């Protein structure tokens, strides 16, 4: 995955519209399907909990299916990019302790590429989500990596990152 420049205001506007559309669609479908099932299947005075639950589950599957079909649409570009970015950050985070050990103790170049990507991706995500609280600790970690790279006379960038690099751990 390569980092991309994302227009923050466009991302936030599109994300808000997607969330609102999802919530409204989900609620209407759940109510509609649940009521249709009750009318078609239920006996008078029967417990309709399972029919309503099935309506909710079916509505959720329909909404998720629609989002999955639309994820490559131009309107969803920023939202889908950030979703994939969060997935990559999470994949790296699960192995972060081992990756840091490889980068700083063993001077593993692949681990340093992963960290370079990770810190830049986190910075982009934090800025898009207005999460400025954790930027100070991110800056310290990024500076530590930059000093380590400088001591090894290495110049690495996030564009060298590929998910397959995570196989080193």
Image (spheres, rainbow, N blue to C red):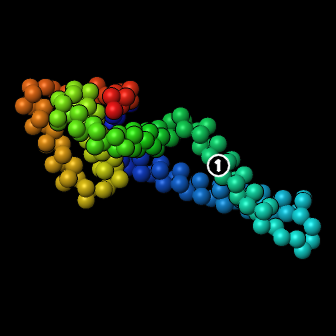
| Relative height, residue 152 to residue 57 (above, below) | above
Q: Quadrant of the N terminus?
A: top left
Taking depth in this image into account, of 102 and 78 the one nearest to the observer is 102
Category of crowding for the residue at label 1, using alpha-carbon neighbours closer than 10 angstroms: few (below 14), some (14–19), many (at least 20):
some
Q: Which residue is painted at 23% across and 39% down in the image?
A: 100
**Which element type, helix, strand or loop, lies under badge 1?**
helix
Relative image position of residue 111 (x, y in whole percent): 26, 31
Q: Residue furthest bottom?
A: 45
Instruction: Specify whether 114 is left or right of 71.
Output: left
Relative image position of residue 133 (x, y in whole percent): 25, 59
Relative image position of residue 87 (x, y in whole percent): 43, 41
Q: Is residue 19 visible?
A: yes
Q: Which residue is painted at 41% across and 47% down in the image?
A: 11
Q: Return the residue at label 1.
A: 63
Q: Which residue is painted at 34% across and 44% down in the image?
A: 93
| Relative height, residue 56 to residue 78 (above, below) | below
């Amino acid at each position: 995955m390569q980092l991309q420049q994302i227009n923050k205001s466009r991302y936030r506007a599109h994300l808000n519209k997607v969330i609102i559309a999802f919530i409204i669609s989900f609620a209407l479908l759940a109510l509609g399907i649940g009521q249709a099932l009750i009318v078609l299947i239920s006996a008078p005075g029967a417990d309709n909990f399972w029919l309503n639950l099935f309506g909710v589950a079916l509505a959720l599957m329909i909404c998720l299916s629609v989002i999955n079909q639309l994820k490559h649409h131009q309107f969803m570009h920023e939202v889908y990019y950030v979703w994939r970015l969060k997935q990559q950050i999470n994949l790296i985070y699960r192995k972060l302790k081992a990756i840091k050990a490889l980068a700083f103790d063993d001077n593993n170049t692949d681990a340093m590429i992963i960290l370079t990507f990770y810190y830049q991706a986190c910075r982009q995500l934090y800025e898009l989500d207005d999460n400025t609280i954790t930027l100070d600790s991110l800056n310290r970690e990024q500076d530590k990596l930059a000093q380590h790279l400088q001591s090894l006379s290495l110049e690495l960038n996030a564009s060298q990152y590929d998910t397959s690099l995570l196989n080193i751990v």
